């Protein structure tokens, strides 16, 4: 995943080389969470299950081979195709902690799942910040009848 310009300052100057070492030397081009291969198009069902051409079988969202056959009707209608792109991620979300054990090679799906709580926190902060800016420059938001215990005009 590309690093936002406002966050580049938090990453070390050799981040591209460090990221390459994690994704391609240590992980050998495979997601360390679900085993999806870098730059390959994979068929998946949107719930983590994906088709692995190398084993000619389905894997789950953790990369484990599914032992049973998928018996769902209309399976072909659910199949999607995604090009996998690996990214190096910080397990503890601290960009200053670049220890080998804190870095992981994740595909975009696993990276989004790993960062879900952080994304929700940032989304809440952004919305709260927008509301505060609106209050600062446009005055408080109008009180609606639903939230007020007193009728308007009193």
Image: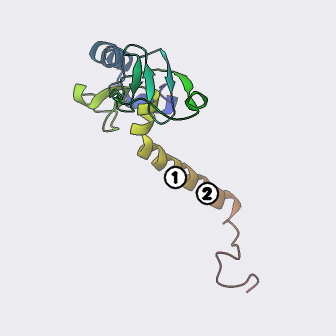
SS at mark 2? Answer: helix
SS at mark 1? Answer: helix
Which residue is under mark 1? 124
Q: Residue at x 48, y 48 (%)?
A: 120
Q: Is residue 13 above or below residue 110?
A: above
Q: Which mark's residue is nearer the viewer, 2 or 1?
A: 1
Camera-side residue of 36 and 92: 36
Using the rendered image of the protein, determine whether residue 22 is visible from the camera's viewpoint: yes
Residue 92: name its quadrant.
Answer: top left
Q: Residue at x 27, y 32 (%)?
A: 97
Camera-side residue of 51 and 4: 51
Residue 154: name its quadrant.
Answer: bottom right
Q: Earlier in the sequence, mark 2 or mark 1?
A: 1
Using the rendered image of the protein, determine whether residue 87 is visible from the camera's viewpoint: no
Label 1 crowd bin: few (<14), some (14–19), many (20+), radius 10 Å: few
Mark 2 and mark 1: Cα distance apart in space: 11 Å
Mark linked to residue 131? 2
Q: Residue at x 55, y 23 (%)?
A: 81
Q: Is residue 75 above or below residue 147?
A: above
Q: Residue at x 42, y 26 (%)?
A: 107
Residue 2 lies left or right of residue 34; in this view the side is right
Residue 11: name its quadrant.
Answer: top left
Residue 148 lies left or right of residue 96; in this view the side is right
> Residue 61's spot in the image, x, y percent?
39, 33
> Residue 84's spot in the image, x, y percent?
47, 20
Residue 41 lies left or right of residue 103; in this view the side is right
Mark linked to residue 29? none
Camera-side residue of 112 and 153: 112
Q: Is residue 137 above or below residue 50?
A: below
Tags 2 and 1 in contact by the CB under 8 Å rule? no
How is this picture coloured?
Answer: rainbow
> Residue 125's spot in the image, x, y percent?
51, 51
């Amino acid at each position: 995943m590309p690093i936002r310009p406002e966050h580049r300052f938090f990453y070390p100057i050799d981040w591209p080389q460090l990221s390459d070492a994690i994704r391609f030397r240590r992980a050998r081009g495979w997601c360390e969470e679900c085993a999806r291969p870098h730059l390959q198009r994979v068929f998946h069902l949107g719930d983590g299950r994906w088709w692995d051409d190398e084993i000619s079988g389905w894997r789950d969202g953790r990369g484990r081979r599914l032992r049973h056959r998928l018996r769902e009707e209309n399976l072909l209608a659910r199949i999607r195709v995604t090009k996998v792109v690996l990214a190096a991620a910080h397990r503890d979300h601290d960009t200053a902690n670049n220890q080998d054990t804190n870095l992981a090679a994740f595909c975009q799906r696993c990276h989004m799942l790993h960062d879900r709580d952080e994304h929700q926190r940032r989304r809440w902060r952004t919305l709260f910040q927008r509301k505060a800016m609106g209050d600062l420059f446009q005055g408080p938001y109008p009180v609606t009848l639903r939230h007020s215990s007193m009728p308007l005009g009193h």
